[in-house]
Image (cartoon, rainbow, N blue to C red):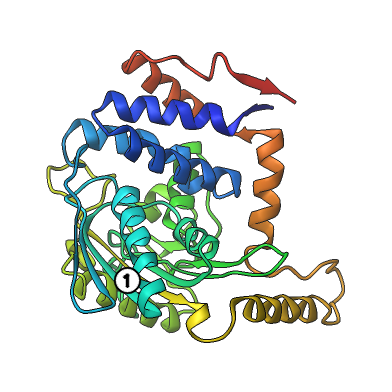
Amino acid sequence: MTFYQADTLKNYIKSILISQRVKAEDAEIVADSLVRADLEGISSHGISRLPIYSKRLEESRINPAPFIKIEKSGLSTLLVDGDHGVGQVAAYKGMKEGIKTAKETGIAAVAIRNSNHFGCASYYCQIACEEGLVSIVMTNSPPGIPPWGGKKAFFGTNPVGFGFPVKDLPNVIIDMSASVVARGKIIEAAKEGKSIPKGWAIDQNGLDTEDPTAAINGAILPSGGVKGYGWALAIEILTGILTGAAYGPHVQNIYHDHHQQSNVGHFFILIDVEKFIPYEYFTSLVKNMLIELKEVPKKDGTDTIFYPGERREKSYQKHLSSGINLSPEVVKDLSLLARRFNIENPFEIGKCDV
């Protein structure tokens, strides 16, 4: 197998984006987000997304040089207009300003509109944890989930992420979509010519399907049935309506060929632990709870009880040293991009075989 070092991939992503008039500082944010996803084992939200970002930048559906406007509305509320730039840029800048506000007032709410796909919600949760804050990160997305009883997609998969800092252990990072599976995994399966498990999605006729292409044209099922439907609705209201972004079927799909901008919405809540209880005490209590959790008697066949965020950190550390494995289909797409923009191709050099 061929593995690629994280820094090599970051430099490649930055070179592609800068060649498309994305500012160097913004390209750095996008590269860090995508590579972090691959390092954590979330390849559906990693560098495999770059080709579609690049295509939409070329068509100006994504603005390469957005003027991101951040306004305060009250003591703890931030309104961010992403100017249709790459989603990671608006989200990162909104998160950074939200952190400043939360440290002043104890809590901050950040509403972001006119954005695009922003990668993994967990990426922003980690940023908040590093600053000693608890975070809730939400985004909507193009239609993927039908309303309960329907057979046509209406809501996005609408993930929500929670981040809790922990003393001397990996942070608790919970990142879940309202669908049975993230849409990216179905897109990935279609790209690689693989089938998907039954129970993930339905086709256009409302029938179970194992064909990822039929699933993309149909709908992904909500997680937990009617509960996931309610979850998707709540996230849609917070991210699509409260922010002033598009909602439901009005969010444009970056993978569909048309000329409309996506207008994705994000909504963040940030909490400064110190304004409630001492930070060291909080992180120690969380650590103690996790230790107790892991000591719960295990059922047959279970060696270790993991908590959310633990496996991500193990994967991150492993891939930092061993490198990131990319599928042949992704490597082909990325090599074509390198040739298209006449940049050094890391898939011919800068790789290490293990």
In the rendered view, tell whether residue 132 sits above or below residue 69. below
Q: Residue at coordinates 73% horizontally, 68% vertically from top-left?
A: 306
Residue 44 locus on image (x, y percent): 49, 47
Q: Residue at coordinates 65% horizontally, 76% vertically from top-left?
A: 280
Residue 206 appears in the rendering: no
Residue 162 locus on image (x, y percent): 50, 71
The one nearer the camera, 123 or 263, is 123
Residue 302 locus on image (x, y percent): 83, 69
- Circle 1 sits in a helix, a strand or a loop, which is it? loop
The one nearer the camera, 126 or 276, is 276
Q: Check the picture and name the quadrant holding the C terminus.
A: top right
Name the residue that disc number 1 marks. 146
Classify residue 313 by image quadrant: bottom right
Query: Seen in the image, is 103 located left or right of residue 17?
Result: right
Residue 236 locus on image (x, y percent): 28, 73
Q: Residue at coordinates 32% horizontally, 62% vertically from top-left?
A: 97
In the rendered view, tell whether residue 120 sits above or below residue 56. below
In the rendered view, tell whether residue 136 sits above or below residue 10. below
Query: Label 1 is placed on what type of residue?
Result: Pro
Residue 235 appears in the rendering: yes
Q: Check the picture and name the quadrant holding the N terminus.
A: top right
As drawn, which residue projects farthest toward the left? 259
Q: Residue at coordinates 28% horizontally, 59% vertically from top-left?
A: 142
Q: Answer few, some or many: residues within 10 Å of disc 1's Cα (few below 14, many 20 plus, some between 14 and 19).
A: many
